[in-house]
Amino acid sequence: MFRLPEQIPYAIERYTAETTRLYGVLNRRLADRPFLAGDDYSIADVAAYPWAAAYNILNQDIDQFPYVERWLDTIAVRPATKRAYAIAKEMNPNAPQPPSPRTAPQAS
């Protein structure tokens, strides 16, 4: 994660609030469907997962977004997701890794 040596409280508060808003949008979208585009895993999930999975470094309380948490946990256990993050770690040992699932989803 890129960080400035100088902390700018206004910027931190503004972008943390915007990130929280976006997690809320995702949470509402996922309230009545398993994946972003509906019943099936799609490119929308592939595109959104990496940034949403970084909630721990984005100062987000995932407990506030139960549908996002369920979605993240479901995608995290997919074999392709595990392979992709393993490759990233092999290429860059400092590459961010998604948090371990907090619930027990089934791979889809």
Image (cartoon, rainbow, N blue to C red):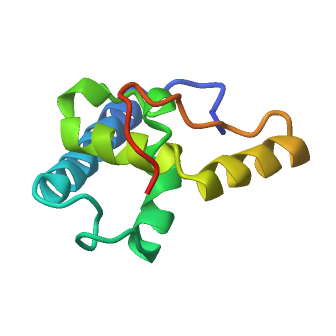
60 relative to 30 in the view: left or right: right
Q: Measuring from the top left, give residue 28's x and y in whole percent.
A: 12, 53
How many numbered tags mark residues here?
Answer: 0
Image quarter hosting the N terminus? top right
In the orientation shown, which residue stands out farthest toward the right? Answer: 91
Q: Measuring from the top left, give residue 49's x and y in whole percent.
A: 46, 55
Up the image or down, 69 lies above or below 83; here it is above
Image quarter hosting the C terminus? bottom left
2 relative to 57 in the view: left or right: right
Residue lying at 35% horizontally and 42% vertically, measured from the top left? 15
Q: Measuring from the top left, give residue 51's x and y in whole percent.
A: 49, 50
102 relative to 98 in the view: left or right: left
Residue lying at 43% horizontally and 60% vertically, measured from the top left? 48
Up the image or down, 43 lies above or below 108; here it is below
Up the image or down, 72 lies above or below 93; here it is below
Q: Measuring from the top left, give residue 65's x and y in whole percent.
A: 21, 36
Residue lying at 27% horizontally and 73% vertically, measured from the top left? 37
Up the image or down, 55 lies above or below 91; here it is above
Residue lying at 43% horizontally and 35% vertically, measured from the top left? 55
